[in-house]
Image (cartoon, helix red, strand yellow):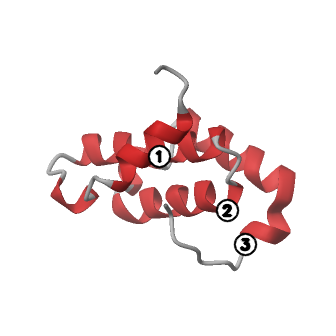
Amino acid sequence: MLGDYGTAVDYARQVDPARIVMPERRARYWEDTALALHGRGRPQATFQALLAAERDTPQEVRYRPWAQQLTTELLNRDSRNLLGRVLPIL
């Protein structure tokens, strides 16, 4: 099951992040969701998850290496298709 990004995305759909009380755990939800979406080859949805994390828990995401690396990779790969598009995350 480890590395099964499709299953991870399916599970993420079942979670309402607003019900996760602790900001650290919500940030982890967004991290795991973004990484699973990235693993599924969905750059736009990955970027939307990163934006949602930034809006929801900026103090937990803004300076984290995983978020910086993933954002840089997405922007370097296909920034024209990411910026300015608002898509459903999942």
Q: Residue at x 16, y 57 (%)?
A: 19
Q: Which x, y percent locates residue 67? A: 56, 43
Q: Position of residue 72 (x, y in %)?
A: 73, 47
**Which badge, 1 or 3, comes first in the chain's sequence?**
1
Q: Is residue 41 left or right of residue 34?
A: right
Q: Is residue 18 left or right of residue 44?
A: left
Q: Which mark is residue 9?
A: 1
Q: Confirm or deny contact between disc 1 and disc 3 (CB under 8 A).
A: no
Residue underneath mark 3: 83
Give 10 or 63, whichever is nearer the viewer: 10
Residue 44 disc label: 2
- Crowding at mark 1 (Cα within 10 Å: few <14, some 14-19, many 20+): many
Q: Quadrant of residue 70?
A: top right
Amino acid found under the numbered disc labelled 2: Gln
Which residue is depicted at the point 49% across and 61% down?
90
Is 24 displayed left or right of 13 in the figure? left
Q: In the depicted view, which residue is nearer to us: 60 or 31? A: 31
Relative image position of residue 6 (x, y in whole percent): 53, 40
Nearest to N terminus: mark 2 or mark 3: 2
Classify 20 as above or below 28: below
Above-or-below relation of 64 to 61 = above
Residue 49: mark: none
| Disc 3 residue type (three-letter) | Leu
Residue type indicated by callout 1: Val
Q: Position of residue 13 (x, y in %)?
A: 37, 55
Counting other residues with Cα less than 10 Å from the Cα at mark 2, is it few (<14), some (14-19), or many (20 or more)?
many
- Taking the spot 58% from the left edge, 47% from the top edge, the residue there is 37
Q: Nearer the viewer, mark 1 or mark 3?
A: 1
- Where disc 2 sits, the SS reads helix
